[in-house]
Amino acid sequence: MATRVRYDDVSVGDELPTADLHVQRVNLVQYCGASGDFNVIHWNERIAKMVGLPDVIAHGMFTMASAGRVVTDWVGDPGAVVEYGVRFSAPVVVPDDDKGAVVTVAGRVEEKLPDNRVVIVLEARAGDAKVLSGARAVVRLD
């Protein structure tokens, strides 16, 4: 069992461990099956380019969930997340399956609230592109 973060041990400004999330096309195909979203722009390079995309792109919800894992890994309990929301600002382009893409997620404690709740803000980038903006989670700690 992962170590759980305690409310009294957290301060505003504390940083969560930064994570580099490696995304390959096989992950997108797996997500297609899990989510039921088989839109071809997530797995077919020819179609993605035909509709004006630079290449295959990751599902927004896949990117959101992957970034959310940074919070759940830090807190030690996925059930501690009481709110989570993001705005999508750029797609994660996955140029080929060998190279894939890397999404770097960083987070910090923005605010401590009553009832042992903590506000976490996240930033997610793929290369130079900020792929999520306004990413915010509220977690309830012990």
Image (spheres, rainbow, N blue to C red):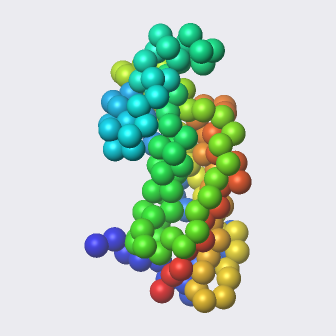
What is the x, y in percent for residue 15?
A: 60, 63
Q: Is residue 104 above or below residue 114?
A: above
- Residue shown at the point (59%, 53%) measured from the top left: 106
Left or right of 10, for residue 99: left
What is the x, y in percent for residue 59?
A: 50, 37
Q: Is residue 50 above or below residue 115?
A: above
Left or right of 119, for residue 103: left
What is the x, y in percent for residue 69?
A: 45, 56
**Foreground residue, 109 or 34?**
34
- Residue shown at the point (47%, 75%) measured from the top left: 80
What is the x, y in percent for residue 84?
A: 58, 63
In the rendered image, which quarter contains the N terminus?
A: bottom left
Residue 141 shows in the view: yes
- Residue shown at the point (52%, 28%) measured from the top left: 57
**Foreground residue, 51 or 117?**
51
Q: How many marks?
A: 0
**Foreground residue, 108 or 40?**
40
Q: Is residue 30 above or below residue 46?
A: below
Left or right of 96, for residue 104: right
- Residue shown at the point (38%, 36%) measured from the top left: 32
